[in-house]
Amino acid sequence: MPFLAEKGFPNSLQYAYQREKSCLDASMSLQEAVLHNIENDSKVYCCFLDSKKAFDTVWISGLFYKLYNFGIQVREEECWTHVGIELCGSFSSTKRALDACRKGKSVMAGLANIGVRPNARKPICGANLWCTIGIPTTLYGCELWNNLTANEIMAMERCKHFNAKRLQGLDLNTRSEAVTGSLGLWSMEVEMDKAKLAFFGRLCHMNAQLISKQIFIARLFSYFTVPVKQRFGLIPDIIRTLEKYNLSCHLTTYINEKIFPSKAAWKMIVYNEIKKLEVEKWKNGICNKQELVFYKEIHTNLEPLYMRRLAKK
């Protein structure tokens, strides 16, 4: 309502129950605000409240003023969880990766309890449930994971390989390329890249009046114009991901001309580029394994095995 908007209600930093706002936007805004100050060697003070109707009943500025006058001691935190998305101030993502693996195994155990196992449901049905339930749960908030190491990514890949073997009733020593290829599963790293690029497209389409969009634009232009010792956060990671899949031209066009593909077009562009690179990587993987010499002759593309697709029909 215009009258309430003029009075500053709802607060522009409030994300609940509003169109075009989400938990991910709230966490991104918090993370990028913190990282901006860290990049510029500034101290960051955060106040986390768990209060009913806090935005509606608490005078935010007055609260900070009272805390300052009372001399409230500031406690240093390395990691904190915001709306279910873990953010790490020490830039260590080990705990986050381990939590993702734990979630992946828990989801698989839950799926097994409802009959997703080799002697009950068909493996391709289990793979579909893993893609629609397991991956989103395991990688919740991955759009903001921007400092994962190779070992942490490998831990999540192993979790996916273990689950894929359980779905098909295969021995734990079965080659991972054959296990994932038989179900047409993409790597966890690629799933994260896909989520990040989708979030980037959403930010580009977002209303310019929203705080999340303003923070995104400010961080984007500061990346190219303000020199700092080291860059952290969403923007450097998005740029690396765009370069990885040869999509940097879309960012350049957006910056210079404010033109970006539609939601459907961007989704298709991302899917095609990621699939092309992932299929090539998978084919190279099976070609270099002597024990898969016969497998690569009967299964030539990264999709569920023909027998599995036929059994589904």
Image (cartoon, grey):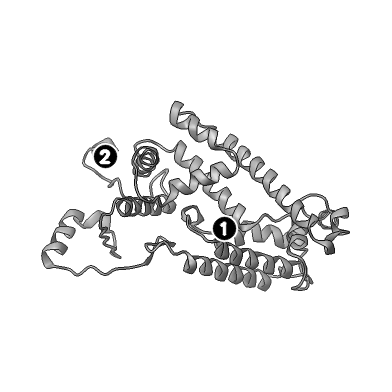
Would you identify the image quadrant in which residue 307 lies? bottom right
> 86 or 234, which lies in front?
234
Upstream in sequence: badge 2 or badge 1: 2
Quadrant assignment, res 44: bottom left
Q: Is residue 25 above or below residue 63?
A: above
Q: Is residue 26 visible?
A: yes
Q: Disc 2 designates what residue?
A: 5
The disc label shown at residue 136, or none? 1
Callout 1 environment at 10 Å: few (<14), some (14 to 19), or many (20+)? some
Residue 285, given in percent of the width and then of the height, sits at 74, 56
From the viewer's perspective, tell me whether residue 190 is left or right of residue 86: right
Residue 178 in the figure: left or right of residue 161: right
Looking at this view, name the residue that lies furthest to the top: 257
In front: label 2 or label 1: 1
Could you tell me which residue is drawn at 52 percent across and 48 percent down?
A: 196
Gap between marks 2 and 1 measured at Cα? 35 Å
Secondary structure type for disc 1: helix
Residue 19, how many percent across, how many down? 41, 44
- Amino acid on which disc 2 is placed: Ala
